[in-house]
């Protein structure tokens, strides 16, 4: 093990994608740093050793002799801040931990549009990026959506940074001061980390601190910005999408001649039939993105054109194909109850048939009884698989027909057997994927591959 330099180093905690981006950031700043990861084989270890030969990397624990030399604690979002080893480290160093979003906020020289919420962050962030690009702005879309924010500081300064930010990242952010900030929605998630819903909501509220324009969900009071987070100069905007929403300066969703339209006040803008993204939950995501785009001055016509061109995101209620009258949807990104609830409500209300729901995986202390009403209303059959399938079975056993499957392929075979023309087979697990897959992307990719096999065999 190489000994740390005499100069006080920054300590990067966690060597995943974010930790690696922090290391690159400090190298560009010519600032000394060391890295700690409690795992013996962190995911970016090989890359780190190649890029930073001689920089100390501690696996498992940090020697006590190093603690007094540390300049700062830079914590990756995946690090549980209430873990005993972490609280002991903070106590011993008397340093306040911060994360990559905080570092980025201190350096960024362009307005930030910051987006969080339990669900739909990626979809709305991508849509807003498309809207601004279509209007001629140079934008960078980054953050929790997959591109580490600090890596973007090496590029030419854009007109706007558009950030998807998770609750884990907001825990260690104090200087965001976004041009536009929004919480899209709040439903129970990550309670194994945040301990209770109130703490989770308060963490999300940090996105509004010092913002200039606050946009929130008019039908979800948990998203309303709390007064202490807003400066007196903040411009307060809201977006509403209740069926009876008729405010002159609000986007909404209304029916005209038995068809649903995105509206602005009482004026129809787009028939949802012209959109590639399906289901009421996706139409509501479009309303959120339209409101954010409108807040920064993008014309409705420009946003409408971009919205019609938007095909949706992989693994997020993604239409795969139709086989013998049955549509197959990949919603593997639905790793919590709120996301699955939204998919059931959104798709269930827009089809003539019923949903065959494939769900299960690794739980996060979620309350699955929240799915009971939507399952009873829209779901013909639930097919359960994964480690914590028994918990889902207990919560839903009186709602509809339940089947158990050994794995995803078995679950999809059972779904095919139970589906009829007009039905939807929906993979929307309401659970994390780590019991059987590397991540939700791998789970979704396997789903897509098996659907393609079914299609070939059907012809």
Image (cartoon, helix red, strand yellow):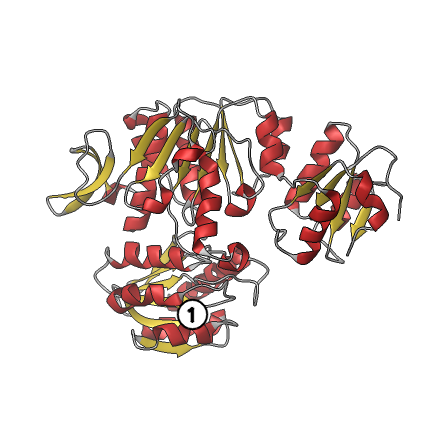
Query: With 178 as the anchor, is 12 left or right in this view?
Result: right
Query: With 425 as the anchor, is 332 left or right in this view?
Result: right
- Give percent across and percent down for residue 432: 51, 61
Picture quadrant of residue 11:
top right
- Give percent across and percent down for residue 68: 81, 41
Picture quadrant of residue 376:
bottom left
Q: Residue at x 36, y 71 (%)?
A: 382
Q: Residue at x 67, y 48 (%)?
A: 16
Say what secondary structure mark 1 lies in.
helix
Q: Residue at x 61, y 54 (%)?
A: 82
Q: Which of 116 and 378 lies nearest the eye of the viewer?
A: 116
Q: Is residue 278 visible?
A: no
Query: With 248 as the anchor, is 34 left or right in this view?
Result: right
Q: Which of 250 and 315 lies nearest the eye of the viewer?
A: 250
Q: For label 1, count other residues whose C-alpha is less than 10 Å away and answer few (under 14), some (14-19) or many (20+).
A: many
The residue indicated by pointer 1 is: 412
């Amino acid at each position: 093990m190489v000994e740390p330099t005499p100069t006080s180093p920054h300590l990067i905690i966690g060597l995943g994608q974010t930790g690696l981006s922090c290391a690159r950031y400090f190298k560009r700043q010519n600032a000394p740093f060391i890295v700690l990861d409690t795992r013996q084989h962190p995911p970016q270890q090989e890359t780190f050793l190649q890029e930073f030969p001689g920089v100390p990397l501690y696996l498992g624990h940090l020697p006590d002799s190093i603690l007094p030399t540390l300049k700062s604690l830079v914590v990756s979002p995946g690090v549980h801040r209430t873990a005993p080893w972490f609280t002991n480290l903070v106590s011993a160093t008397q340093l306040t931990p911060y994360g990559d979003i905080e570092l980025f906020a201190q350096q960024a020289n362009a307005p930030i549009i910051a987006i969080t919420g339990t669900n739909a962050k990626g979809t709305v962030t991508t849509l807003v990026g498309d809207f601004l690009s279509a209007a001629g702005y140079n934008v960078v879309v980054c953050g929790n959506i997959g591109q580490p924010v600090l890596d973007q500081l090496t590029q030419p300064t854009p007109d706007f940074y558009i950030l998807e930010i998770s609750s884990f990242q907001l825990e260690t952010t104090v200087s965001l001061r976004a041009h536009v900030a929004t919480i899209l929605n709040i439903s129970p998630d990550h309670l194994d980390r945040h301990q209770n819903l109130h703490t989770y909501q308060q963490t999300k509220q940090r996105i509004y601190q010092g913002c200039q324009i606050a946009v929130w969900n008019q039908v979800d009071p948990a998203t309303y910005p709390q007064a202490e987070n807003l400066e007196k100069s903040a411009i307060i905007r809201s977006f509403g999408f209740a069926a009876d929403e008729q405010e002159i300066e609000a986007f909404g969703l209304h029916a005209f001649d038995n068809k649903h339209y995105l509206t602005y006040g009482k004026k129809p803008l787009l028939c949802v039939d012209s959109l590639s993204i399906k289901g009421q939950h996706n139409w509501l995501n479009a309303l959120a993105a339209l409101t954010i785009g409108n807040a920064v001055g993008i014309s409705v016509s420009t946003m409408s054109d971009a919205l019609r061109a938007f095909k949706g995101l992989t693994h997020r209620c993604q239409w795969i194909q139709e086989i013998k009258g049955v549509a197959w949807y990949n919603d593997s990104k639905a790793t919590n109850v709120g996301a699955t609830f939204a998919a059931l409500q959104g798709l269930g209300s827009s089809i003539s048939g019923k949903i065959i729901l494939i769900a299960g995986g690794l739980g996060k202390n979620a309350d699955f009884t929240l799915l009971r009403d939507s399952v009873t209303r829209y779901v013909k059959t639930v097919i359960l698989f994964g480690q914590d399938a028994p918990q889902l079975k207990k919560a839903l056993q009186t709602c509809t027909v339940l089947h158990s499957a050994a794995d995803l392929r078995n679950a999809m075979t059972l779904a095919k057997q139970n589906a009829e023309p007009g039905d939807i087979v929906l993979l929307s697990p309401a659970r994390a994927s780590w019991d059987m897959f590397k991540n939700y992307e791998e789970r979704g990719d396997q789903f897509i591959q098996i659907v393609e096999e079914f299609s070939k065999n059907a012809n």
